[in-house]
Image (cartoon, rainbow, N blue to C red):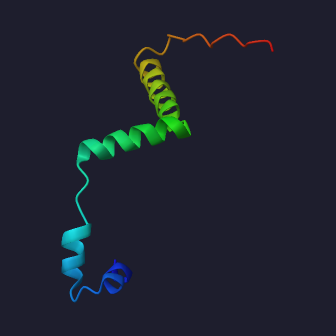
């Protein structure tokens, strides 16, 4: 921001900040993060980890319960 201040010849960094800096609302941040995670595939990884945690929790509660493994696909 100091470079912008110098380029615009503002005497104070406060002037530059007040004019050119604005707060990003939390709803916008959430939307950007969700889109980024989807593009990078992070959301699917998070859901997979949550699912695994849930399975582990169930297995501890009911030890005799064995959840079937998904069938392997032949390619």
What quarter of the picture does the C terminus occupy?
Answer: top right
At which x and y percent is residue 52?
Answer: 50, 26
Quadrant of residue 33 in the image?
A: top left
Residue at the image position 38 percent from the left and 82 percent from the top: 3
Q: How many marks do you count on the picture?
A: 0
Query: Residue 40 versus residue 49: which sits nearer the camera?
Result: 40
Quadrant of residue 67 in the image?
A: top right
Taking the view exactly as shown, the residue that stands out farthest to the bottom is 11
Query: Residue 19 versus residue 52: which sits nearer the camera?
Result: 19
Is residue 58 rendered to the left or right of residue 10?
right
At which x and y percent is residue 44?
Answer: 51, 30
At which x and y percent is residue 28?
Answer: 29, 44
Is residue 14 rendered to the left or right of residue 64?
left
Residue at the image position 31 percent from the left and 82 percent from the top: 8
Taking the view exactly as shown, the residue that stands out farthest to the right is 75
Query: Residue 2 versus residue 10: which sits nearer the camera?
Result: 10
Residue at the image position 49 percent from the left and 35 percent from the top: 38
Residue at the image position 21 percent from the left and 70 percent from the top: 19
Q: Judge whether 65 appears above or below 59 on screen.
A: above
Is residue 2 rendered to the left or right of residue 64?
left
């Amino acid at each position: 921001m100091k470079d912008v201040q110098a380029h615009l010849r503002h005497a104070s960094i406060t002037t530059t900040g007040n004019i050119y800096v604005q707060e990003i609302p939390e709803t916008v941040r959430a939307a950007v993060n969700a889109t980024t995670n989807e593009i990078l595939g992070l959301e699917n990884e998070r859901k997979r980890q949550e699912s695994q945690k849930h399975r582990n929790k169930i297995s501890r509660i009911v030890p005799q319960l064995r959840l079937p493994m998904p069938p392997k696909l032949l390619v």
